[in-house]
Image (cartoon, rainbow, N blue to C red):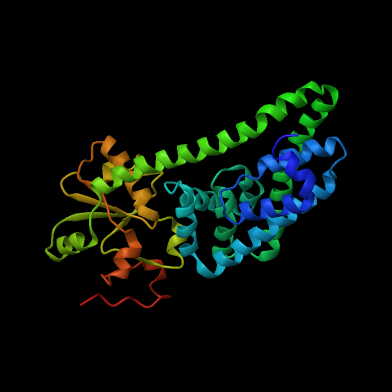
Amino acid sequence: MALPTDILLVYGYLLIFAWVLVEQLGLPLPSVPILLAAGALSAQRQISFPLALAVAVAASLIADSVWFFIGRTQGHRVLRLLCKLSLEPTTCVRRTQDSFGRRGGTMLMFAKFVPGLSTLAPPVAGQNGMSFGAFLLYDGIGSAFWVGVSMACGRFFGDLLKRNPTLLDWVGRFSGALLILGVVAFFIGRLIRRRMVLKNLVASRLEPEELKQQLDAGEQVYIVDLRHPLELVPDPFTLPGAVHFSPDAIAARHLEIPRDRDVVLYCTCPSEATAAKTAMQLHKLGIERVRPLRGGFDEWKRLGYPLDAIPPFSTLVPAIEPAS
């Protein structure tokens, strides 16, 4: 039989556990082909469907629990790292935070089916104070649903093979090659997309030192904070005079943005991805003097430049002394 069913017949449940665990820990190694193969083999009674389901769900819960506690202790720093590893930094963190803000724990019940959301959902849940018991409940339901659907599809294909054995020759001849080609095409597409975004970004971004000089000289600069509201909870500060906008709402509110001065956008995404994407959107709306801030909020803070406390948090968090 074809890859990966040959390997499954040798290593069985250990391979299922290890493959799912590694993928859910963040390594971009798709486990769906393994789950499909396990489902197909269960139709021939070579693998137990319930046992394979339990093993895969256990691996998923272990990996997700690790990310949950990392998110609880490390906050947005680990999200930035995961975004860099995802090969698609333009939307990964914000999409997860938006989904969690709208749906809460129920997000975990479908996160496994959304590329990029699967690995980011557990640390976002940990960062935002969800109890571990509630996390296990929602994540367990989501993991069981994801594994069950994948294996059920494989089981359906396995039943077809039992009724029409000639299909097995076609599968054995082409499935391994198709699997490899699919994985390669996936990575090439992601890399091309990222390269195009970063190329546009490098051409337009503004250095923090240049912005600081503009502010010190009293120049009129319109600064836009694009961070998600959840990012403001652990770090309730903003650049001097910055206005908070949601990237999703900026098109509807673009008339509030002045056209007679520089517009500086910042976020906390790797390579200022959200700021770059929003800058391109504003260009299409006729706002020409717009630039993302290199390094975003984290770089400005690292350089010791002045920050304003956000009013709702100013009584809870000591103010940062302006840099001399």
Residue 53: tell me if it is visible: no
Please tell me in which quadrant of the rendered image residue 127 appears.
Answer: bottom right
Q: Position of residue 224 (x, y in %)?
A: 30, 53
> In the image, 323: left or right of 25?
left
User: Considering the image in quadrants, where does the C terminus appear?
Assistant: bottom left
Total marks shown come to 0
Which residue is depicted at the point 34% across and 62% down?
297
Return the residue found at the far left: 217
**Along the line of sight, which residue is nearer the eye, 136 or 318?**
136
Return the residue found at the far right: 45
Q: Position of residue 221 (x, y in %)?
A: 19, 55
Q: Position of residue 60 (x, y in %)?
A: 68, 54
Residue 1: tell me if it is visible: yes
Q: In this picture, is 267 found above or below 240?
A: above
Please tell me in which quadrant of the rendered image residue 195 appears.
Answer: top left
Please tell me in which quadrant of the rendered image residue 323 appears.
Answer: bottom left
> In the image, 283: left or right of 110?
left
Q: Position of residue 190 (x, y in %)?
A: 46, 41
Which residue is depicted at the point 88% across and 39% down?
45
**Along the line of sight, which residue is nearer the eye, 259 or 211?**
211
Which residue is depicted at the point 52% across and 38% down?
184
Q: In this picture, is 297 found above or below 261?
A: below
